[in-house]
Structures are given as C-alpha cells and as structure tokens.
DNA sequence: TTTATTTTAATTGCATACAATTTAATTTGA
DNA sequence: TCAAATTAAATTGTATGCAATTAAAATAAA
C-alpha cells in the first residue's frame, strides 16, 4: 500500500477500532441507563464484582484507567451508595474500594446486560469470540512496546 | 457461558475493544505530537485530506462525531491555521471547512505516521488486516440495529 | 535515625464525547 | 404566501480520559 493510500480512513485499523469502540458504548448506553450506570461506571462495577476491596491502583490497572479518571468516577458511585471509599489502615496511601450491599445487589440486575446488548446487536457468537481473541492478541502486541518504552528500553 | 461468567471483564468483547482503542490512541500520541495534533484532530485532518471543503455534518458522519465535539475541535485547528471555517453562501446553515495551504502541507509530514506507529507496535501486517476487516464486519453488524432503532423500527 | 526516594491518590488543566437544547436558515405544506 | 416543520451548527451540561503536578505516607539509604 502506498503511503498515500495508508492515510485513507477506510484503510486505517486504528480508526476501525476507535469507531467500533464508540459504537459499542452507544449500544450499551440504553441498557445501562436502567441500572443508573454509564459505560465506564459499568466496567468499574464489573471489576469490583469480580474482586472486592481493592485499591484505586489495582482497579486502574485492570481497567487501564488512572486516578485522574477513577477518583471522580468512584466518588460518584459512592454518592450513589454503591460503594465505600476508605483509606487502608495498614497503608494509609491506599484507598480501599468496597462494594456496599446495594452495590453487590446491583449485580443481579447486571447479569442480563450482556445478553440484552447482544440481542440488540446484529452480531453472532462466532464473530464475537473471534473478535475478543483478536483484541487480546492485539493488546499483547501493543502493550510490550509501551511498557518497554516506559522502562526506557 | 453462564451469565455469571459473562460478567467477567476478560470475557467481554466490549471491554477488549474499548481497551484496545485506548491503547492505540496512546501509541499514536507521541508520533502525532510532532505534527502538533491530538488523535481526534488527526482523524479529522485525515478526513479533510481525503475530501476538502465539506460541511460539519458530512465530516461528522464520516468520523462518527457530532457538532458538540467537532465545533470546538475545528475552532482549534482553525486557530492553528490549518483550516478555515466559513458559512456556505448557497446554504447559510452549513459551515464549510476548507484546508489552508498549511493544512494541505501538513499531509506530507503525516504520510509517515502510519508506518512509524506500526513499527513501534509489535503488530504484523496480517494481524492488522484481519482486525481491520473484522472491525468492518462488526461495525456493519452494530450499525443497522442502531439506525433502525433511531427510525423507530 | 533521619534524609532521600518511592509510592498512592488527589488535583489541575486540557481535550474529547455525546445528549439535549437553542438559534438561524431553509424547506414544506396549508 | 406564510406559518409549520425540518435542518445544520452552536451551546450547555455532564462524564470521561490522560498528562503533569501535588501531597501524604511508606520505604530505602546513608
């Protein structure tokens, strides 16, 4: 491909992934609205339903988000009564995020979210699984470069 | 898969795409900084290099962005001297975006961006092409649902 | 021990992103 | 024609998202 061709939007994988990510979020939005959550709040809750009582740092590593994004987001979820934010007694630098009873209870309603969104999309299971595995490959291909870069290698 | 399993982050294709999109943007950032552009500004310029003198609406349709995002972004690019914003004489509702000489000239520097980013990533060409085609499939699978929804079907 | 370094969140500043509303211009329909 | 409906941008408000800095706490080093 010429470098001229390489500049066309339709040829750019980066744009395709970017556009898909936004379209997916758009699809989730009405379903998540029933739970009173935004998409980012939803993935934060997903992480907490998997593992509770974690620090902001650990949550950020799992969600690829930093404290600049998480701090206000977690304050909103706390205001909604879904979780508590309290310093770790053993290490006061860390803030431990713990689900409240309401936060744990919300998981029941969330169980049907993936199915609902899937049904609203025109996607079939094979495509979904193939894409997930390829995104996993892509992520591992992208991350070492970034990580090595940060370590100055 | 149980609905319990379906809530795990690692099983969610939506999260995989979301995470990859962010990682890709992160990879582009240092390269684009040399052009003085952010990622979103870059894709806007890409669209304009392909087709100049377009309305905000047309640009938005190609980039999947609305005027709330584009208006301030285009004002910044105008302030940088890369384009001009002027009402269409034939239809004053439309704002025509036209590349300036500097805006057109910037394309020369941009020609090497895709190659640079590609080299910094650990991705091979086959993976890239496969993902692009799958993102295309995914996009067409997602969009009819949304479009039909908007038309009230 | 006591200073220097590192670590963790929070904060600040800037740039998206999008829903909802508003404003101005154009088109439609009675 | 001329009011009603539609269209295109801009604006407003809320929510990310991240780089860079700050502040507090813990750890390492002298």
Image (cartoon, coloured by chain):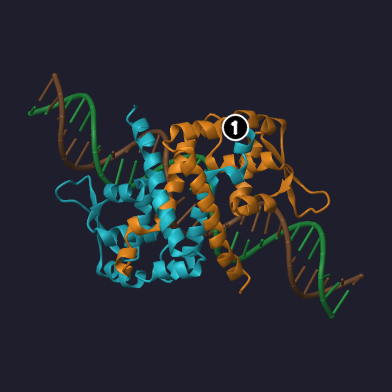
Chain colours: A orange, B cyan, C brown, D green
- Relative to A87, is A150 above or below? below
Q: Is residue B43 left or right of residue B24?
A: left
- Identify the image quadrant of residue D20: bottom right
Q: Is residue B119 visible?
A: yes
Instruction: Tell me if B126 is positioned left or right of D28 in this view.
Output: left
- SS for callout 1: helix
Up/down of A3 relative to A139, above or below: below
Q: Residue at x 31, y 47 (%)?
A: B61
Whole-percent x and y of residue C7?
Answer: 73, 61
Q: Can residue B84 be seen from the camera position used here?
A: no
> Residue A138 appears at what percent x and percent y?
52, 57
- Report x, y in % for residue A72: 61, 46
Q: Give the side of residue B122 with respect to residue C16, left or right.
A: right
* Residue wearing tag 1: A110
Q: Residue at (43%, 64%) from the top-left corner?
A: B125
Q: Position of residue B90 (x, y in %)?
A: 14, 48
């Amino acid at each position: 491909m010429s470098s001229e061709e390489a500049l066309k939007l339709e040829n750019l994988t980066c744009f395709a992934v970017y556009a898909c990510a936004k379209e997916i979020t758009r699809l989730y939005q009405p379903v998540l609205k029933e739970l009173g959550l935004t998409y980012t709040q939803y993935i934060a809750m997903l992480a907490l339903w998997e593992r509770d009582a974690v620090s902001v740092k650990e949550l950020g590593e799992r969600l690829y988000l930093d404290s600049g994004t998480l701090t206000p987001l977690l304050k909103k979820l706390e205001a909604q009564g879904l979780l508590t934010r309290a310093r770790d007694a053993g290490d006061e630098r860390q803030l431990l995020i713990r689900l409240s009873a309401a936060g744990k209870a919300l998981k029941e309603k969330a169980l049907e979210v993936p199915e609902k969104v899937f049904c609203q999309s025109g996607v079939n299971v094979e495509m979904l699984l193939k894409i997930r595995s390829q995104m996993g490959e892509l992520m591992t291909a992208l991350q070492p470069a970034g990580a090595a870069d940060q370590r100055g290698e």
